[in-house]
């Protein structure tokens, strides 16, 4: 978990000083190729992927105090489509402990979509950090393709 003082809210993670586009590996640690990903998508009816957001006084999805999703995390899908609360009904908060902005918590977001071309997501935009006491970290879950 870090404060990210050199980075700005509303910027894609790939543009952070220590950031990058997300990449994915197979069980042996080899990069997953375009051909393999294409076949996974062709043979699947849906796909899902989680993100765990570890926070300290920072919102990930719903801001309970303002009753708003204005600072909700945004995802960039493999198909270059932006996804968030305002435009994608397939994203849900399994746990939203960060909504209260009180102490150390976590939010787990799940994208569970029939639009298999969106998964895996390749970039993330975080929108609530930069305050003197705010910190966050994150863990990207595996992409799961379902028959």
Image (cartoon, rainbow, N blue to C red):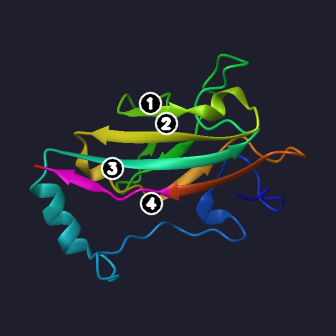
- Estimate the spatial distance between the alpha carbons at disc 2 and disc 3, rounded to whole Å: 12 Å
Q: Label 3 crowding class (10 Å Cα cut-off): few <14, some 14-19, many 20+?
A: many
State which tag comes first along the sequence, 1 or 3.
1
- Residue 30 position, x and y percent, is 32, 83
When asked about the image quadrant of residue 72, the answer is top right
- Estimate the spatial distance between the alpha carbons at disc 4 and disc 2, rounded to whole Å: 14 Å
- Estimate the spatial distance between the alpha carbons at disc 2 and disc 1, rounded to whole Å: 6 Å
Residue 71 can be seen, yes or no: no
In the picture, measured across the screen, residue 53 lies left or right of residue 34, that is: right
Residue receiving disc 4: 122
Q: How many marks?
A: 4
Q: Which mark is residue 87?
A: 1
* Residue closest to the eye, 135 or 124: 135
* Residue closest to the eye, 104 or 136: 104
Q: Label 4 crowding class (10 Å Cα cut-off): few <14, some 14-19, many 20+?
A: some
Q: Which mark is residue 84?
A: 2
Instruction: Please determine whether, in this image, residue 55 is positioned above or below residue 69.
Output: below
- Residue 68 position, x and y percent, is 64, 20
Residue sitting at x 49%, y 41% = 108
**In terms of secondary structure, where does tag 1 sit?**
loop
Instruction: Please determine whether, in this image, residue 89 is positioned above or below residue 51.
Output: above
Q: Please say whether residue 137 is one of the residues in the magenta stretch.
A: no
């Amino acid at each position: 978990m870090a404060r990210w003082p050199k980075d700005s809210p509303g910027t894609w993670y790939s543009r952070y000083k220590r950031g990058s586009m997300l990449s994915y590996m197979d069980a042996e640690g080899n990069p997953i190729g375009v051909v393999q990903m294409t076949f996974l998508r062709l043979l699947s009816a849906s796909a899902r992927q989680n993100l765990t957001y570890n926070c300290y006084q920072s919102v990930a999805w719903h801001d309970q105090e303002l009753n708003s999703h204005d600072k909700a995390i945004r995802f960039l899908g493999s198909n270059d489509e932006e996804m968030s609360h305002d435009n994608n009904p397939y994203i849900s908060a399994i746990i939203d402990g960060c909504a209260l902005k009180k102490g150390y918590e976590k939010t787990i977001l799940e994208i569970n979509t029939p639009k298999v071309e969106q998964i895996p997501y390749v970039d993330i935009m975080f929108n609530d950090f930069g305050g003197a006491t705010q910190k966050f970290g994150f863990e990207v879950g595996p992409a799961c393709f379902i028959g």
